[in-house]
Image (tube, rainbow, N blue to C red):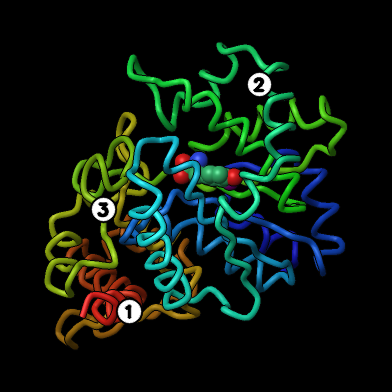
């Protein structure tokens, strides 16, 4: 696959395409990052951006994972001590999942975000940004009436992270888009360069096919799920025989094949008894989706196969969690 295609595959958007093409021309030595508010157990939302980081490593980029402990603190996720403990577990799960340990820099936010220079830049950004602008940037991450002062500081710090971690590309789910747009506007105010951003899609809820799948809303799959729990969740997933259900709905089973399974496996085998036509082998998502639509692949077989491959992906992280907790 061409470097540009590998960098951008399965991305919902890149800002801007021209800037990302430039990176793709000479990826060696360029640095890309995702920041995560630490949480003890990874779920599919984390793994979707992790898949992109693996693509970027394969494309020759250096990858930085920001364990955003200060951000989690600002977002009310607990004491620093609690947050750091979950951050260590998170790191172990990412490595078990397949991030290259020797080629991934894990950085705690608190390692640099409390330095004097960073703090002074932060205050300069606070002065340059209206409350309204910062709040709008945060709407997808922490909205509503309960917004605290910390929630408007949060996106300004995320903006500075891009400069202070010396990055060439900011990666995140589509929910990070407004913060990255703010960063593109504000970094030049401080005399820093604008950096491109790449956003992964938000996957639909497993059971309904609508909205956003995350640990807080709806059903997701996590590193904690046993094989049986995982099978149960996948078997009760919404899976109409089309990739484009009516209205705003998505087909979450197909989405999981597209964004989680095909990027990590060269070949997918659907095991079927001879009397039902025998095994089916797929090396790309499109063919599998077309077979589901035509009826050549039954939703029940698709689900069984999906559960098997997802289980293989989360098994090492599940084992790691067991060790940590033992
Ligand atoms: N806002 C992210 C966490 C985060 C991301 C980046 I990229 C940072 O530089 C800092 C924090 C979230 O919603 O999880």
- At x 82%, y 25%, the residue is 189
Give the residue pinned by disc 3.
Answer: 220
Q: Position of residue 305 (x, y in %)?
A: 26, 73
Q: Quadrant of residue 188?
A: top right
Q: Secondary structure at mark 2?
A: helix
Disc 1 packing (10 Å; few <14; some 14–19; many ≥20): many
Tell me if I can see residue 229 in this picture. Answer: yes
Marks 1, 2: nearer the viewer: 2
- At x 46%, y 57%, the residue is 48
Residue 320 numbered mark, or none: 1
Cα separation, mark 3 vs mark 2, equals 36 Å
The reply to whether dot 3 and dot 2 touch (C-beta < 8 Å) is no
Tell me if I can see residue 290 in this picture. Answer: no
Give the residue pinned by disc 2.
Answer: 126
Q: Secondary structure at mark 3?
A: loop
| Disc 2 residue: CB within 8 Å of ligand 1 | no
- At x 40%, y 64%, the residue is 90
Outermost residue to the front: 116
144 vs 307, nearest the viewer: 144
The reply to whether dot 1 and dot 2 touch (C-beta < 8 Å) is no
Q: Position of residue 205 (x, y in %)?
A: 27, 44
| Residue 246 relative to residue 289: left or right | left
Cα separation, mark 3 vs mark 1, equals 19 Å
């Amino acid at each position: 696959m061409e470097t540009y295609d590998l960098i951008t595959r399965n991305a919902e958007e890149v800002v801007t395409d021209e800037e990302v093409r430039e990176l793709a021309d000479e990826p060696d030595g360029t640095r890309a990052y995702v920041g995560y508010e630490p949480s003890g157990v990874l779920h599919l939302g984390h793994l979707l951006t992790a898949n992109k980081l693996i693509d970027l490593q394969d494309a020759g980029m250096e990858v930085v994972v920001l364990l955003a402990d200060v951000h989690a603190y600002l977002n009310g996720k607990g004491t620093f001590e609690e947050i750091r403990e979950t951050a260590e577990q998170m790191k172990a799960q990412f490595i078990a999942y397949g991030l290259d340990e020797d080629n991934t820099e894990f950085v705690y936010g608190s390692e640099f975000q409390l330095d004097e220079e960073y703090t002074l830049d932060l205050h300069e950004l606070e002065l340059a940004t209206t409350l309204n602008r910062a709040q709008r940037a945060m709407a997808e991450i922490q909205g509503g009436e309960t917004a605290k002062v910390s929630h408007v500081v949060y996106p300004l710090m995320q903006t500075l992270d891009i400069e202070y971690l010396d990055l060439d590309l900011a990666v995140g789910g589509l929910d990070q888009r407004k913060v990255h747009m703010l960063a593109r506007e504000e970094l030049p105010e401080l005399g820093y360069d604008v950096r491109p951003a790449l956003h992964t899609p938000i996957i639909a809820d497993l059971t309904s096919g609508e909205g956003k799948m995350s640990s807080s809303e709806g059903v997701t799959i996590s590193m904690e799920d046993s094989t049986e729990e995982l099978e149960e969740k996948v078997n009760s997933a919404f899976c109409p025989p089309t990739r484009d259900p009516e209205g705003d709905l998505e087909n979450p089973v197909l989405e999981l094949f597209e964004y989680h399974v095909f990027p990590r496996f060269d070949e997918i085998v659907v095991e079927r008894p001879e009397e039902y036509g025998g095994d089916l082998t797929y090396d790309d998502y499109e063919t599998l989706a077309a077979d589901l639509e035509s009826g050549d692949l039954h939703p029940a077989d698709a689900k069984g196969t999906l559960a098997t491959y997802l289980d293989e992906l989360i098994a090492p992280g599940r084992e790691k969690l067991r060790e940590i907790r033992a």
